[in-house]
Image (cartoon, rainbow, N blue to C red):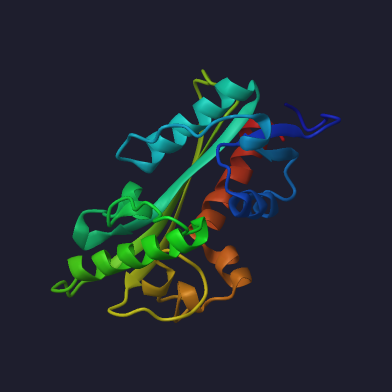
Amino acid sequence: MSASQAHPLRLVLASNNAKKLAELRDLFAGVAVDLVSQGSLGVDEAEEPYFTFLENALAKARHAAAASGVAAIADDSGLCVDALGGEPGVASAHYAGLMSAPPGMDREALRHLQDAANNQRLLQELKQVPTRTAAFVCTLVAVRHAQDPEPLVAVGRWPAQILTAPAGEHGFGYDPLVWIPALGQSVAELGSAVKNQHSHRARAAAQMKQALRDAWHL
C-alpha cells in the first residue's frame, strides 16, 4: 500500500446506504482509494450489538473485510445528549423503538414516521432539563483485513444544543432539533454543502484521510 501503487486501493464501505457512499467518496477525494458498497460485493449487513460507536463500527468493518476479502471501512454515528448520559447514542435511529411499516407504506414514509417518533421521545426526555448540550458523533474504523491488529480509528464530534421545538425543513433524523451554536442555525436549516463541510462525518473523514496517508501510505 504505497503511494506508488498503479491503482487505488479497493475499500469496501460496510453500508448499503447510497447517500453515505456518495458523501464519503466526496470526503475522501485526494486519497487513492476506490470506495465501493458492501452490497455491490454481495456482503450482508453485520450485527451491531454493542453500546459504543467504536465497537459497532469495528464489528461492521471486520465483517465486511472477512466477507469481501478486501480492506474495509465502517462508520457508526448518532446523537449524544449530555443530560441523558449520552443517549440516544447507538440507538439514535430507533430511540422510540424500532417501527415496522404497515401494509402499503414505503421505506421513505416509514423513515419519516420513525424520525418523528424519535424526535418526540427526545423532546419528552428533555422536557424538564435546562441544560441541553449535545453532539452529533461519528466514529470511522478502517481495517486492512478482518484480523488487522491496528485498525485506524477517527472520531468526529459536532457540538450542538437541543431545541425545544423543530426548526428547518432540510435534513433528516434529529436535524430539526439540533442547533449548531457556531453556525447560528439548526442542522435542518443548513444547506447540504454547509452541512457536509462542518458535520461530524466530515470531521471524522478528515482525520481518517490523514490516517490513511500516514499508516497505509495512500
Q: Residue at x 65, y 53 (%)?
A: 27
Task: Find residue 143 and report its horizontal and vertical position in percent.
Answer: 56, 28
> Number of labelled discs?
0
Q: Residue at x 46, y 32 (%)?
A: 46
Which part of the image, by quadrant, shows the N terminus?
top right
Depicted 109 relative to depicted 142: above or below: below
Query: Outermost residue, front direction?
Result: 103
Can the viewer see residue 145 in this picture?
A: no
Q: Residue at x 60, y 31 (%)?
A: 72
Task: Find residue 52 and report its horizontal and vertical position in percent.
Answer: 33, 41
Task: Find residue 22 and report its horizontal and vertical position in percent.
Answer: 67, 53
Q: Residue at x 69, y 40 (%)?
A: 35
**Which sits in the foreground, 181 or 93?**
93
Query: Outermost residue, left direction?
Result: 128
Query: Outermost residue, right direction?
Result: 6
Depicted 136 relative to depicted 70: above or below: below
Can the viewer see residue 14 in this picture?
A: yes
Query: Outermost residue, top direction?
Result: 147
Q: Is residue 59 left or right of residue 32?
A: left
Q: Is residue 173 left or right of residue 190?
A: left
Task: Find residue 113 and report its horizontal and vertical position in percent.
Answer: 39, 64
Which part of the image, by quadrant, shows the C terminus?
top right
**Which sits in the foreground, 31 or 215?**
31
Depicted 188 relative to depicted 28: above or below: below
